[in-house]
Amino acid sequence: MVDRRTALRLAGGGAVGALALGAATGCADEPVRAPDPLAAQEVMARTDAAAATAAIALTPQRQTALSAIATERTAHADALRAEIARVVGVYGDGTTPARKTRDLAAPFAATTTGPDAAGTAVPPISPPSIEQLREQLARSRKSAADLAVTQSGYRAGLLASVSAACAAHAGVLLA
């Protein structure tokens, strides 16, 4: 025969177990999100900066203009990374949450990433010609402009600014 105290302990333990099980399965069912659309813009900015730096090897007489492009495109990448981190959020201890994001290259695969886990490192590249760099910056300009019209507020303004800077780089600094 089970006394009342033992019955209450069993019921309480079962309730705690049910809550723990619910919490564990709730975490496993976290939705898989699409990557932040600004992440691709950040990678493009870092790639452009690396290309401008590499182009100095082929055209050292244009070092000043190419260095300015590299510096500004790096600043664009940093601003885009800061906006991505702002949207994801930061915990009180300064760390950022991990999020499941879908890899657009493999539409059914999901990886856990945080705002700093994006592949922002640019592999070494061969030095582009000035014409190739101008075309690359034109693609970056168009991509940022196209994305700006789909965004709102600060994000739209940031992307419009990036697009305008790329136009100036390609049309003025590399003319």
Image (cartoon, rainbow, N blue to C red):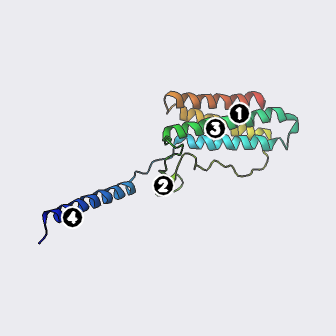
Distance from label 1 to label 3 (Cα)? Answer: 10 Å
Crowd class of label 3 (few under 14; some 14 to 19; many from 20; radius 10 Å): some
Residue 29 at x, y = what percent?
37, 55
The N terminus appears in which quarter of the rendering?
A: bottom left
Q: Position of residue 133 (x, y in %)?
A: 74, 40
State how far apart marks 1 and 4 are (Cα): 65 Å
Which residue is labeled 4 in the image?
A: 10
Tell whether label 3 touches label 4 (CB within 8 Å): no
Residue at label 1? 72
**Residue tagged by mark 3?**
78
Q: Earlier in the sequence, mark 2 or mark 3?
A: 3
Q: Amino acid at mark 2?
A: Pro
Looking at the picture, how far across and down is residue 28, in whole percent? 39, 57
Above or below — where is 26 with respect to 149?
below
Is disc 1 placed on a helix, strand or loop?
helix
In the image, which is nearer the foreground, mark 4 or mark 2?
A: 4
Q: Earlier in the sequence, mark 4 or mark 3?
A: 4
Pick out the residue farthest to the right.
Answer: 61
Q: Nearer the viewer, mark 2 or mark 1?
A: 1
The image quadrant that residue 132 belongs to is top right
Question: Mark 1 or mark 4, which has the lower sequence index?
Answer: 4
Q: Report whether 89 appears left or right of 158.
A: left
User: Residue 23 in the image: x percent, y percent?
Assistant: 34, 55
State which quarter of the image contains the C terminus.
top right
Three-letter amino acid code at disc 1?
Glu
Q: Residue at horizontal 80%, vertical 32%? A: 65
Q: Nearer the viewer, residue 62 or 99?
A: 99
